[in-house]
Image (spheres, rainbow, N blue to C red):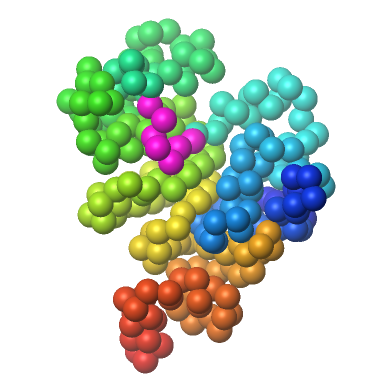
Amino acid sequence: MIEIKNAEKSFGDSKVLKGVSAVFEAGKANLVIGQSGSGKTVLLKSLLGIHKLDSGTISFDGRIYSELDEVEKRDLRTEIGMVFQGSALFDSMTVAENIGFPLKMFTNSPNSEIQKRVDFVLKRVNLIDAHNKLPSEISGGMQKRVAIARAIVNKPKYLFCDEPNSGLDPNTAILIDNLIEEITDEYNITTVINTHDMNSVMEIGDKIIFLKNGLKEWEGTKDEIFRTDNQAIVDFVYSSNLFKKVREAYLKS
């Protein structure tokens, strides 16, 4: 579980986070949504320790990040997996080498154990024949699955995903959503996803945080989002005619 209390962050005169509080539970897909400039990227980077909050706290299963020493922060980093927006694979490394990189960076595991773990996660994301391929030799959807495999290779307690469906066709995006949801549930991971993909919100939003102008404007589940009368999130989510019709049908049922 990750708990955020009264998080505030400014850059110069611009206040980006304005007292945001939230709880992200283990075994659930926790989605953060909002328009550009809403603060969701800064919030994610704060969770990763890239940005230091001006005030407020972030705690990981009771461990307040700002109170940890450098050794404790490094230990916590080994419990975190990250899926970047553009996958961020190393072009010169094979798929297997990309996935094994965190184990070589953060553990003292022998090569035989690293290989065993790499084989396991590749099988888990259904890429059993991709070991020796370079990122340029596989599709965007496969690259995203490699990124997910790399993120979970170290058996993380916490998984962060930044726009995991960016650049993917709708069918592949659904596959990635389902994979993230399955892994989250299977390994009881606390997963936090920054997304603008409303299909993801409707499909896997166990908990949704909606940020607007640095404030938490709304929170709820994928079911509650259909019933909300919060005009800000209604305008954001149901800007397309398709989702308006889905909501109307839901309210009539």
Q: Residue at image x 60%, y 28%?
A: 77
**Left or right of 174 on screen, residue 66:** right
For residue 220, which quarter of the picture? bottom right
Range drawn in magenta: 82-89
- When the figure is inspected, residue 159 is found, relative to residue 177, above or below; the finding is above
> Farthest residue toward the bottom?
252
What is the magenta segment's predominant secondary structure?
loop
Image: 36 above or below 232: above
Residue 180 x %, y % = 38, 47
Tell me if residue 86 is in the magenta stretch.
Answer: yes
Q: Residue at x 20, y 26 (%)?
A: 137
7 shown above or below 103: below
Q: Name the residue at the front extreme.
A: 13
**For this view, does 59 lie left or right of residue 142?**
right
Is residue 175 shown above or below 232? above
Asked whether 18 falls inside the magenta stretch, the response is no
